[in-house]
Amino acid sequence: MKTIQLIVLCFFAHFINAQEKSLLWEISGNGLSKPSYLYGTIHIICPKDYFMTDSTKAVFQKTEQVYLELDMDDPTLMSKMTQTMLLTNGKKMKDYLKPEDYTLLSDYFKQKMGMSLDQIGGMKPMTLMSMLYMTLLSCQPQSYELVFTQMATSAKKELLGLESVEFQMGVFDQIPYEKQAELLADMVRKKDESSKEFVDMVTLYKNQDLEGLLKLMDNSEWDFNGYEDILLANRNAAWIPIMENAMKAKSTFFAVGAGHLGGTKGVLQLLKKKGYTVKAVL
């Protein structure tokens, strides 16, 4: 499940005190005149599970600008996303799946979404996986990114992105489509297990338990072993100089997938190595 959780969560949590269960972290010191804040999101969650602490709302109001993974108020965002969702190599999903897996997935999407792979098979595997996760939810999902976008707009705060849509979607293009398609089919084949794992992930997220999320990921049947640097570490490292420049200029509220926070190559550790004081806000 590490696949979509990189769209949904993306997380590692080594070197985080097990007692400090928090999604919100203060960044100070190292010459900063004002603290900035880093929040770990989950990209889709049912409204009944959605929450935002008073401390998160308070520090959001104190900051002067907002950075998400993407610039969510870019008027061209949706058109750019649409352009990156489709296979452009002349192939379709049928070319990456065994015949029996193609039938399995096609029947599933037909049942759940009214569209077979004959109709949507030109989409990239990761696009289809995003659609698959929507079928695992028994709700119209809530988005932290959209909420923070609305909060920034309401407060007239500048909203910016740490990376472009083209770059983010291109990250997944570095992973063989055959591997992605195989994982997609396996998640449908083991739907009960994948659904339970998603429920467990949400529970841990609600408990703000980054260490527990790490253990869940380590034990997951669905992952991209060998591609962690592409999906997480390289992006984390690329964000640090952008974050530093932003924090030096203005007190900034950053919100990224919770999986980017922890681990030896996570954003929290990278900031500490740069000399910043990073502490949980409870």
Image (cartoon, rainbow, N blue to C red):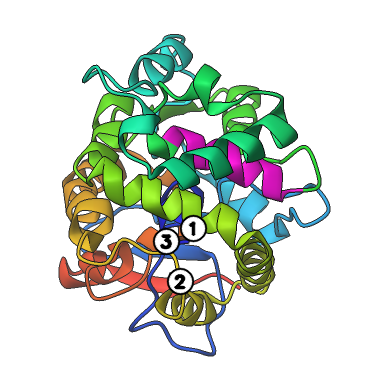
- Residue in the picture at 64% in, 37% down: 107
Amino acid type at image mark 3: Lys
- Give the distance between the C-alpha atoms of the residues marked 1 and 2, in whole angstroms: 9 Å
Residue 68 is at least partly visible in this image: no
Residue 138 position in % (x across, y down): 80, 47
Q: Which numbered dot is residue 2?
A: 3
Residue 167 position in % (x across, y down): 24, 31
Amino acid type at image mark 1: Asp
Task: Count how many numbered circles sit on residues in the image.
Answer: 3
- Residue in the picture at 22% in, 41% down: 242
Residue 130 in the magenta stretch? The answer is yes
Asked which secondary structure carries label 2, the reply is: loop
- Give the distance between the C-alpha atoms of the residues marked 3 and 2, in whole angstroms: 9 Å
Q: Are marks 1 and 2 in contact (CB under 8 Å)?
A: yes
Q: Which numbered dot is residue 221?
A: 2
**Quarter of the rendering occupied by the C terminus:** bottom right
